[in-house]
Amino acid sequence: LRRIALHSESALEMLFDETRALVFSEALRIVSFAADAEEITSDVFARLWTAAGTFNPQRGSVGGWLLGVARNKALDRLRSRGVRERSPAELLRQCDRQDPESMLGL
């Protein structure tokens, strides 16, 4: 990770080769779609590239850190998918249940 923090592409490539399957499987376990898991895996390693210097080995292993980032990104994906998958009718019902005055800040 020290080499990655210094922007060593070969170090990133080596760690990617060693841990990609682990990160992908964690993401896939959560989101259930291979395309989403691939994108999350890419996001995890992009985050690693920019944040490698923040890793603290006293708080855990590199693998654990990567899995935590993957888990957070996968859960974020599920949350955003949940919002996007609401039907227009469901959104209207939700608006109907709210007090109109509270929506206007009155």
Image (tube, rainbow, N blue to C red):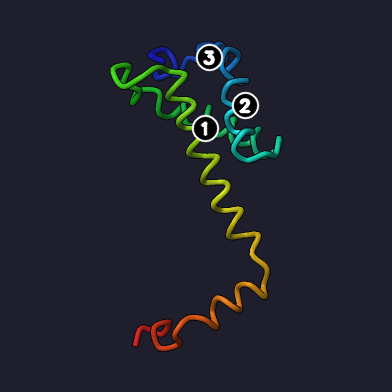
Task: State which tag comes first along the sequence, 1 or 2.
Answer: 2
Residue ID for mark 2: 25
Depth order, front residue of 74/50: 74
The location of residue 33, given as percent across then percent down, is 70, 39
Task: State which tag comes first along the sequence, 3 or 2.
Answer: 3
**The residue under label 2 is which amino acid type?**
Ser
- Residue extending farthest to the left is 58
The location of residue 89, given as percent across then percent down, is 67, 75
Residue ID for mark 3: 15
Instruction: Residue at 48%, 38% (x, y): give it.
Output: 72
- Is 99 situated above or below 64? below
- Distance in Å between CA atoms under marks 1 and 2: 10 Å
**The residue under label 1 is which amino acid type?**
Ala
Indicate which label's residue lies in the foreground, 1 or 3: 1
Determine the secondary structure under disc 3.
helix
- Distance in Å between CA atoms under marks 3 and 2: 16 Å
Instruction: Residue at 53%, 27% (x, y): give it.
Output: 45
Q: Quadrant of residue 50?
A: top left
Q: Quadrant of the N terminus?
A: top left
* Mark drawn on residue 70: 1
Instruction: Residue at 35%, 23% (x, y): give it.
Output: 55
